[in-house]
Image: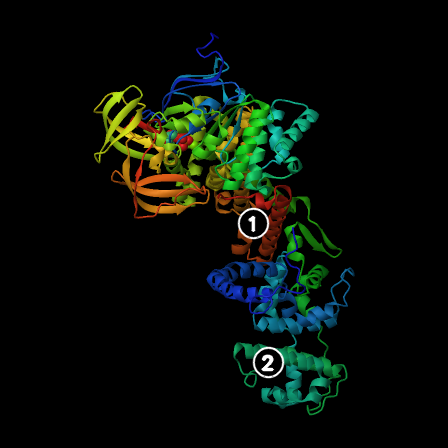
Amino acid sequence: MTDTTSQSGPMLAADGTPLKKSLHRAQRRQKVRALMLIAPLLLFILVTFIAPIFDMLLRSVENDIVPDTLPRTVVALQDWDNASGEAPDEETFRAFYTDFALAEEQKAHTRLGSRLNFEMSGISSVFRSTGRDVGKFDTDYYTDQFVDADEVYEDPVQWSEWMADDGVASALPQTADAYAGWVKVLNEEGDDPLDEDIPDFVYTALYHDLAAGANPPVLPSVDVSGWDDISLKEQFIDSNEDWADPDIWATIKAFSGPYTAGYFANSIDLQSTPEGFAQRDEDERIYIKLFIRTMVMSLAITGMCILLGYPIAYLLSHLPARKANLLMILVLLPFWTSLLVRTSAWKVLLQNQGVINDILVWIGIVSDDNRLALINNANGTIIAMTHILLPFMILPLFSVMKTINPSYVRAAKSMGANDWTAFWRVYFPNSVPGIGAGSILVFILSIGYYITPELVGGVDGVFISNRIAYHISSSLNWGLAAALGSILLVLVLGLYYVYDRVVGIDNVKLGG
Amino acid sequence: MAPTAADNAFVEFDRVQKSYDGETLVVKDLNLSMPRGEFLTMLGPSGSGKTTCLMMLAGFETATHGDIRIGGTSINHIPPHKRGIGMVFQNYALFPHMTVAENLAFPLEVRKLGKSEREAKVQRALDMVQMGKFGGRRPAQLSGGQQQRIALARALVFEPELVLMDEPLGALDKQLREHMQFEITRIAHNLGITTVYVTHDQTEALTMSDRVAVFDDGRIQQLAPPDELYEAPQNSFVAQFIGENNTLTGVIKSIDGGRCAVQLDSGEVIDAMPVNVSKPGERTKVSIRPERVEINKSRLSPDAHTLKAEVLEFIYMGDIFRTRLRVAGREDFIVKTRNAPDQVRLQPGTTIEIGWLPEDCRALDA
Ligand SMILES: Nc1ncnc2c1ncn2[C@@H]1O[C@H](COP(=O)(O)OP(=O)(O)O)[C@@H](O)[C@H]1O
Ligand SMILES: [Mg+2]
């Protein structure tokens, strides 16, 4: 080779601009055109695929509801030692009272209760029962006391003016905070704070500020020193004695951050304890088992599809085009009937008194009182799903086999290889990309399958996706569903990576 | 096995027929016998059954009728992998998932040769086709010509006595093709192997072969060495197919020993050599090679028949001149003359007289 770029510096186009630049300019139009062509699909995928996946990933760690609903409690709980074995102090209960009363105004306490119930069962009912009581706490005593002391304390307009005063706000931090929270809730609900009665918890906060020695300007002075001190801790425990249980508080504290690993921990059978995450009891571990079962059974289904699909694809690819097309229609026939119909058909065939068992008994292979359990267990899932997914194996195998030049096998034979050697050493390696493509399709489809296992899987034939569906539609634990889904996604990507390493992803062909 | 008719025959086709669909015969009565070490080419238009013959010999197709023998033994019932025939396919059929060296080692492996022996043979075969350094490459990383060499080396590495090649150079460009033609014949002759070579390219057939079998319509039309094929075609198909050829049609007027007179459709009478015509009144196609036409009347014998010809076109082709004439009502009559200092360049529009030696003008079947 001689050096053709003997000139120094960049190559120049005919008009003197650097060649790279003019090439770039020439290609820009094409690039814009290409972008415009894919734009609709890109948008579609972004909206319907990427965004939901992102949302799902986010949901699996999102925990806004606790810090958003209980902001004051979360701060107060920071100083509480959850290993102390006791419920938090009065101070924390005061913060909790304000939070809870505000939450109750918006009915947010039930949502929070449901959320925390995922971490500790029973919490939800505690939240709901106290939600009914919180408006009837004895704290109306403070309201009466202030109004008795000066009528003006009843006037929401006055309150609004006081709280607008910087001096007041800084002198009465708890009051200002509670009032601001209340105003915010009212505004969100479209009510006018100037028309509504000031709630008990604001008076309670005012009492606590004043009792702590605050000396606010503007407000009519009230001497609170002789007043009863109502313990909010007792109020809560009176409402529901579980508030004395430190475990509730440990749970709230553990899930007080805006993000949580709790859903993921749950997904791999861990639970939160005061000492951090620990494995669940033996009989409560379900998810890891389900993940493993999903993988193993998907592999089994993939293996079955290879075993059953390879000879079919081989036959099809060696038939004349007309016959092959006819048979191909038969292969695709399952797609013509609804998935539900097919799955239900399997129920009829496979059940204990079903066609297959009847035939086996009739032939005498199995005895009548020893009929095979072919459905409502893992067998049923594997049989039905192999049937449903088989075309996804046959199609790529067929199109890859079609491209294997018949002269390869002939060449091998002419060189002295017998039929088996020619197949195994020459034909088979060239069909591996089809096996790869088919396996990836079948495996990924089966890993996420849910209708068929639901219908024919019984108890030990269900997949992780059935659990995900359950959490999405029944238990409404979307965070856990999202975490399970994310783990599944990572597992699939991990397998994909391993596959790429072992077989090579460019070794996957769908034909051509 | 009883000795066969041709005792020195190595490969024999004995009245072989082949039909794929049970309705039409693709090969209709093929008889062929090749001595050991011969380079024989099957030449014919596409669809004439060449590949079919090769595949029957290799064992990938079974003859519908007749006997194929190698070394006197009928091979009709021997499976392909036991025939020990090397093959080069048109698309080379190099295994894409193996390196070049693995491709070459394959036939040795299935023969259970030891590793060191295998490697030595592979290297020798690669060196033979001047590809010694390419053992580690994948076929996809080679150019067409290189793949071709590897395919050749692979067909030869297990030292078969018989090698079949089906249009092995079809995919190469002209220059490479010519070079490989030379290489293949050199190697085949050096190794002394018997070769059946299939091509539809007559130049290739003529330059490479000891003998050429011209195929058409499922039959061998003529089996002869290249020079004989070109100079003495036995029928009008061969005359047309091999080389350039001027054809005039007419009727035999008289036959006398090695000479006949042919009355052309346009009325003129010419002298010709009867090849496969037998009696007066028969229609015939006479065939004259463009380079055997004489345009200089003084070089013809005085009693020779001549024809009037009008010059239509003169094409300068470097080494030769190619002149198109109107002769006996046809406008595709070509004359080729050597570009020599004394050669006349015929001017279009002029009229000349042309003639030829009667033995260069062959009266063939119509
Ligand atoms: N496998 C086959 N099945 C049916 N017909 C075939 C097959 N192979 C070749 N033929 C037919 O046989 C004839 C001869 O084909 P072939 O031997 O390939 O010719 P060639 O190699 O001279 O071009 C063609 O008409 C072709 O259509
Ligand atoms: Mg052919």
Q: Residue at x 37, y 30 (%)?
A: B48
Q: Which residue is mark 1?
A: A467
Q: Residue B12: x, y in percent?
A: 45, 17
Which quadrant of the render holds ligand 2? top left
- Dividing the picture into quarters, in which one does residue A196 lie? bottom right
Q: Which of A61/B311 is in front?
A: B311
Secondary structure under the numbered disc 1 in the rendered image: helix
* Residue B265 picture quarter: top left
Camera-side residue of B109 and B84: B84
Q: Residue at x 48, y 33 (%)?
A: A406
Measuring from the top left, give residue B38's x and y in whole percent.
51, 22
**Measured along the vertical axis of the image, is residue A132 above or below residue B194?**
below
In the rendered structure, find residue A350 and report the number of the disc placed on it.
none
Is residue A182 rendered to the left or right of residue B236? right
In the image, is the residue at mark 2 within 8 Å of ligand 1 by its beta carbon? no
Residue A351 seen by the camera: no
Q: Nearer the viewer, residue A469 or A70?
A: A469
Question: Looking at the image, which residue is at 78% across and 61% down?
Answer: A84
Identify which amino acid the numbered label 1 is placed on.
Arg
Where is residue B168? Give x, y as percent. 50, 34
Q: Chain of mark 1?
A: A
Q: Which residue is mark 2?
A: A183
Q: Secondary structure at mark 2?
A: helix
Coordinates of residue A360 in the picture (x, y in percent)? 45, 26
Number of residue marks: 2
Other residues around mark 1 within 10 Å, as few (<14) / some (14–19) / many (≥20): many
Counting residues from the start of the chain, the first of labels 2 and 1 encountered is: 2
Q: Residue at x 64, y 83 (%)?
A: A144
Q: In which quadrant of the rendered image does the C terminus of chain B lie?
A: top left
